[in-house]
């Protein structure tokens, strides 16, 4: 249990470093890929949803710890994780590609909306005018790139699932 938790945290830390260090330096549409969130949704879909929720909460805490001041990834990711638990059990119950993309898009929208509400409250507290960045082109581009990343990851996992199961899941 402890070794699994440590390895999950190290994997999360590595993914955060890859997202912040490598993916953010890619050209415009690819730099918007939320790799940490994609892996959280994949954990919801292919393993236990509670593991995906723990991944998102830990990712939010880690992103807030090393991220920009004033952002609240923990609040947004935790809310998205809890909404994902409900949606996975009640709405997207089958494990199809459409269910995974629907779950991911719903969770991403909730996360983005919570972050925008957080930023609007912070802007109002310091007296700056509010912006409606939630409805901007960046949100829709990030949602599209996120869905595309989920599609590619889903296809890769389905293609190599026997290899992955043989190497990592079945212990002899």
Image (tube, helix red, strand yellow):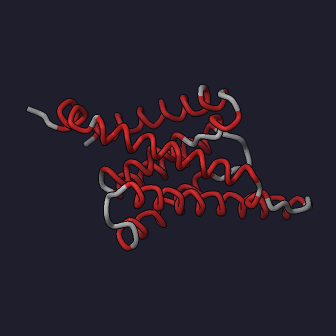
What percent of the width, then of the height, locates residue 113? 66, 63
Q: Is residue 121 left or right of residue 153?
A: right
Q: In the picture, which quadrant includes the N terminus?
A: top left
Q: From the viewer's side, name the closer residue of 129 and 143.
A: 143
Figure label count = 0
**x, y percentage for residue 76?**
59, 58
Residue 55: image location, x then y, percent: 43, 48
Q: Residue at x 91, y 61 (%)?
A: 129
**Is 72 on the left or on the right of 120, as rendered?**
left
Q: Quadrant of residue 133?
A: bottom right
- Residue 116 drawn above or below residue 160: below
Determine the residue positioned at 75% across, 61% down. 135
Q: Nearer the viewer, residue 7 or 80?
A: 80
Q: Position of residue 123 (x, y in %)?
A: 84, 59
Horizontal arrangement in the rendering, residue 156 relative to residue 105 (left or right): left
Which residue is the extreme one toward the bottom?
90
| Residue displayed at 55% across by 55% down | 77
Residue 130 vs 45, above or below: the answer is below
Q: Quadrant of the C terminus?
A: top left
At 84% across and 63% down in the image, what residue appears?
125
Q: Quadrant of residue 114?
A: bottom right
Q: Is residue 140 left or right of residue 36?
A: right
């Amino acid at each position: 249990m402890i070794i699994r938790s440590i390895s999950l945290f190290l994997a999360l830390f590595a993914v955060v470093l890859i997202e912040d260090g490598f993916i953010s330096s890619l050209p415009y549409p690819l730099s918007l890929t939320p790799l940490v969130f994609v892996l959280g949704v994949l954990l919801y879909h292919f393993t236990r949803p509670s593991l995906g929720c723990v991944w998102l909460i830990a990712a939010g805490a880690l992103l807030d710890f090393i991220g920009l001041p004033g952002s609240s990834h923990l609040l947004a990711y935790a809310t998205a994780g809890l909404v994902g638990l409900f949606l996975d059990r009640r709405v997207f119950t089958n494990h199809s590609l459409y269910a995974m993309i629907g779950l991911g898009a719903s969770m991403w929208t909730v996360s983005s909306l919570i972050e925008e509400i957080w930023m609007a409250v912070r802007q109002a507290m310091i007296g700056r005018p509010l912006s409606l960045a939630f409805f901007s082109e960046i949100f829709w581009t990030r949602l599209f790139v996120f869905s595309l990343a989920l599609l590619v990851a889903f296809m890769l996992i389905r293609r190599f699932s026997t290899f992955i199961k043989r190497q990592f899941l079945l212990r002899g």
